[in-house]
């Protein structure tokens, strides 16, 4: 049960929380379904969001990465412009706002001081705010006008895993419900597609041995590692890099595939691991082109693709899901690879050095 705060037979909370993800997504579907099985969001919330001419997502760390994906979902389905901002930057450098902005704060803990500082400013300006959080009654939830809950159960490990996928789940539901409220017809059934995601997550959670081997092969001795992807896969790469660096202390960076040639490719040496993610048909060839570029400079490529786009050279293939929801599944191999890399390096997986679960100072 995802509401359990005991580790049980798991060696680490992080592994337990990774494994809970299929359950969390299934529970989320239930929590947001009405008696007819349709996904619903409180009418007040949808009306407020519907009235906005632009949405501003503000968050930090993993929640910021979820915001990047969520913005794409909302723009693609509901056709509303969305900006995504790092809270600590927005706080000191507020952009010129649209006429009718609505703010969405994404925060697992609901206690992140950087995000709260923005919320305080936004409230002073009189703009509406919605908090997407795992903790009912948290500061960000109490101080915003509206709250959407993640229902992920307590997340104990410092490295966020199930909260990230739950954030993506909630944002996909918000995008779909908003789209319908705005009169756009969806070409897919989100309940069904999130169900497919939950099943795919289960398959991935059962691939631990394979992913441990990948971690051993690519990351046991390296000092650094790059993640590349395009569009959705780029955002997942950012999250993969954050996960890896925070728990294994391997210097890791996520890049947009097309940006490599503008500087980063200079860092590629013989044996540098490059984890490339390809789940988006539109950019599959371009990202594979980027892989060739780094391989020509000696990189050790690890391609993670989605079934249907896979080739023989790929190291790992995730099951097919709706492309818009692919980050919910492609992040799981990255979480598990990070977990095993940290384990192999004798790192304290659940309590990495210098980090706190919720950052309550600015
Ligand atoms: C995630 O693995 C990190 N520990 C961290 O980036 C976290 O996501 C960030 O501090 C934001 O926290 P919040 O979601 O509780 O606001």
Image (spheres, rainbow, N blue to C red):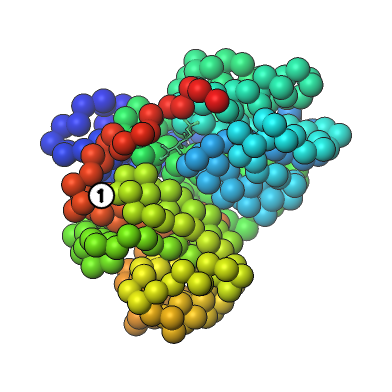
Q: Residue at x 30, y 56 (%)?
A: 337
Residue 79 on image: x %, y % = 74, 50
Q: Residue at x 38, y 80 (%)?
A: 298
Residue 201 on image: x %, y % = 34, 52
User: How many marks can you see?
Assistant: 1
Nearer to us in this view, 222 or 98:
222
Q: Is residue 284 left or right of residue 185?
A: left
Nearer to us in this view, 114 or 81:
114
Question: Can residue 137 be seen from the camera position used here?
Answer: yes
- Work out whether 135 lies above or below 176: above
> Quadrant where the N terminus lies?
top left
For residue 180, which quarter of the picture?
Answer: top right
Q: Residue at x 34, y 82 (%)?
A: 312
Q: Residues within 10 Å of mark 1 (few under 14, many from 20)?
A: many
Q: Is residue 43 left or right of residue 208?
A: right
Considering every residue shown, the one lying at the far left of the view is 9
Nearer to us in this view, 116 or 346:
346
- Work out whether 356 lies above or below 56: above
Nearer to us in this view, 75 or 335:
335
Residue 49 on image: x %, y % = 72, 33
Residue 308 on image: x %, y % = 44, 74
Q: Is residue 14 left or right of residue 94?
A: left
For label 1, the SS is: helix
Considering every residue shown, the one lying at the far right of the view is 99
Q: Residue at x 43, y 81 (%)?
A: 297
Question: Can residue 336 be seen from the camera position used here?
Answer: no
| Residue corresponding to mark 1 | 342
> Quadrant where the C terminus lies?
top right
């Amino acid at each position: 049960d995802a509401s359990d705060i005991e580790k049980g037979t798991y060696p680490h909370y992080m592994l337990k929380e990774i494994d809970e993800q299929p359950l969390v997504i299934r529970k989320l579907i239930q929590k947001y379904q009405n008696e007819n099985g349709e996904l619903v969001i409180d009418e007040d919330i949808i009306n407020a969001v519907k009235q906005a001419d632009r949405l501003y997502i503000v968050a930090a760390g993993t929640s910021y990465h979820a915001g990047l994906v969520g913005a794409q979902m909302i723009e693609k389905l509901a056709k509303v412009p969305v900006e995504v901002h790092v809270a600590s930057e927005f706080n000191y450098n507020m952009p010129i706002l649209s006429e009718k902005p609505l703010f969405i704060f994404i925060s697992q803990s609901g206690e992140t001081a950087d995000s709260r500082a923005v919320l305080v400013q936004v409230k002073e300006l009189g703009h509406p705010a919605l908090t997407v959080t795992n903790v009912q009654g948290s500061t960000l939830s109490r101080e915003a006008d509206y709250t959407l809950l993640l229902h992920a159960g307590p997340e104990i490990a410092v490295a966020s895993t199930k909260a990230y996928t739950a954030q993506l789940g909630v944002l996909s539901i918000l995008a779909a419900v908003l789209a319908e409220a705005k009169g756009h017809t969806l070409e897919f059934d989100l309940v069904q597609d999130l169900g497919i995601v939950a099943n795919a997550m289960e398959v991935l959670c059962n691939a631990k041995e394979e992913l441990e081997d990948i971690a051993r092969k690519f990351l046991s001795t390296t000092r650094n590692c790059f993640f590349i992807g395009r569009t959705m896969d780029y955002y997942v790469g950012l999250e993969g890099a954050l996960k890896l660096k925070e728990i294994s202390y391997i210097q890791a960076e996520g890049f947009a595939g097309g940006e490599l040639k503008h500087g980063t490719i200079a860092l590629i040496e013989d044996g540098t691991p490059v984890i490339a993610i390809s789940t988006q048909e539109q950019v599959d060839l371009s990202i594979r082109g980027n892989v060739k570029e780094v391989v020509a400079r000696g990189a050790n490529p690890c391609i993670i693709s989605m079934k249907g786009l896979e080739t023989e050279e790929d190291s790992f293939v995730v099951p097919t899901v709706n492309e818009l929801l692919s980050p919910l599944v492609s992040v799981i191999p990255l979480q598990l690879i990070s977990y095993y890399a940290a384990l192999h390096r004798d790192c304290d997986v659940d309590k990495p050095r210098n980090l706190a679960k919720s950052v309550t100072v600015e």
